[in-house]
Amino acid sequence: MNYSDLAPSYIRAIAPYQPGKPIAELERELGISGIVKLASNENPQGCSPLAMAAMQEALKTIALYPDGNGFELKDALRKRYGVAHDRIVLGNGSNDMLELAARAFLTVGDKAVYSDHAFAVYPLATQAVGATGVSVPAIDFGHDLKAMLQAAVAQQAKLVFIANPNNPTGTFLSAATLLDFLRALPTNILVVLDEAYNEYLPEERRYDSVGWLEEFPNLIVSRTFSKAYGLAGLRVGYAFAHAQVADMMNRVRQPFNVNSVAQAAAVAALQDEDFVRRSNELNRRGMEQITQGLSKLGLEYIPSYGNFIAFKIGDGMKMYRRLLELGVIVRPVASYDMPDWLRVSIGLEEENDKFLSALKRILGEKQ
Ligand SMILES: *Cc1c(COP(=O)(O)O)cnc(C)c1O
């Protein structure tokens, strides 16, 4: 018998998520070393030393179950953002937030709206609960919120996913655009505002989405410790929402979905604002280095507000493999309907150099 037939048809229809390859796996495959990985938007500076120390301390009590309510982390978030404990959901990465929102609020026959070229987990989380995804055409690779609003109303969607900035395109929606959308959207349609790259926004682009929660009870703001905080391997993220929304999300999560080491590290990471500032600064300089390099090579790119950038290269898969052979891992984005593009994460100066040199070499070969 074919065991996949035992799964509902909507599960069988899911295309598996393609993660970036781990360095060790590629070094084994290609028989080379010193590979530079600029494929998963990880923090090239690592994490805060305060987080590292907290993790070591937390290991001493690793035999014990974690705090299933995450009191210390919720309290640290409350102090930082002024959000009460009952309006916070903690998760195994912010990926968990997207899934919990889908699991709590969507079922077979329901609809979720997202944008073309938006983060791959939105369709995955939607399909996994048997709901139907409605992907709305983008404008210049960014979300078309007017069209998304129309689609959400016309299709009587339950949930809208918005990534700001979006991955893999790096596009950004201004506070005014988001507010227009939220004000026009019926309040019985939930909005997950995925701010995985929030900490990388320049000062003048920042907006108070946490404050907006007062005005919009249907808003879920999702954030992560994986990106600017440099804790991707630990898996810890959080969401702020109306207490009733948070309650529903908390009911469907695993009782111990955030491990004890991750909780301790996240609390410590929140205290180290200097680390985040340095990450941001490094990212700003690296972004300049890479955009200048891409321009010099005559390559088109999408201006990005994250710690990565998408650039146009022709046959993305082929160029991805050529870069791999030269020891640089980037991210193909064909599955985002961008077969002519690649996405590169901003690394340390020398990593960015290695990427640009490899790119220059393969472009030279092409002619
Ligand atoms: C990286 C990313 C996330 C989630 O990452 P986690 O490690 O699960 O927190 C969520 N949304 C977007 C747009 C991302 O790029």
Image (cartoon, grey):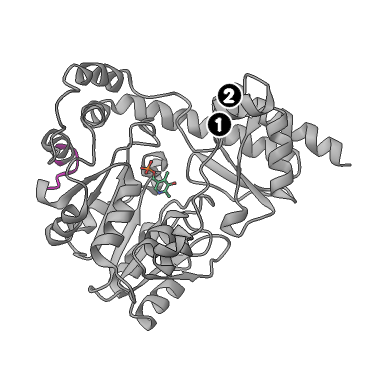
Type of amino acid under label 1: Gly
Q: Secondary structure at mark 2?
A: helix
Residue located at (18% from left, 16% from top)? 60
Would you say 310 lies left or right of 96 here?
A: right
Residue located at (46% from left, 53% from top)? 166
The answer to which of 344 and 79 lies nearer the viewer is: 344
Residue 98, percent from left and from top? 33, 54
Would you say 351 lies left or right of 241 here?
A: right
Would you say 108 lies left or right of 214 here?
A: right
Dot 2, how many residues are within 10 Å of its Cα: few (below 14), some (14-19), or many (20+)? some
Residue 299 at least partly seen: no
Which residues, given as a range, are shown in magenta?
78-84
182 inside magenta stretch: no
Q: Secondary structure at mark 1?
A: helix
Residue 189, percent from left and from top? 27, 72
Provide the residue designation for mark 2: 349
In which quarter of the view is residue 201 placed?
top left
Provide the residue designation for mark 1: 286
Disc 1 residue: CB within 8 Å of ligand 1: no
Residue located at (23% from left, 51% from top)? 210
Would you say 53 lies left or right of 168 here?
A: left
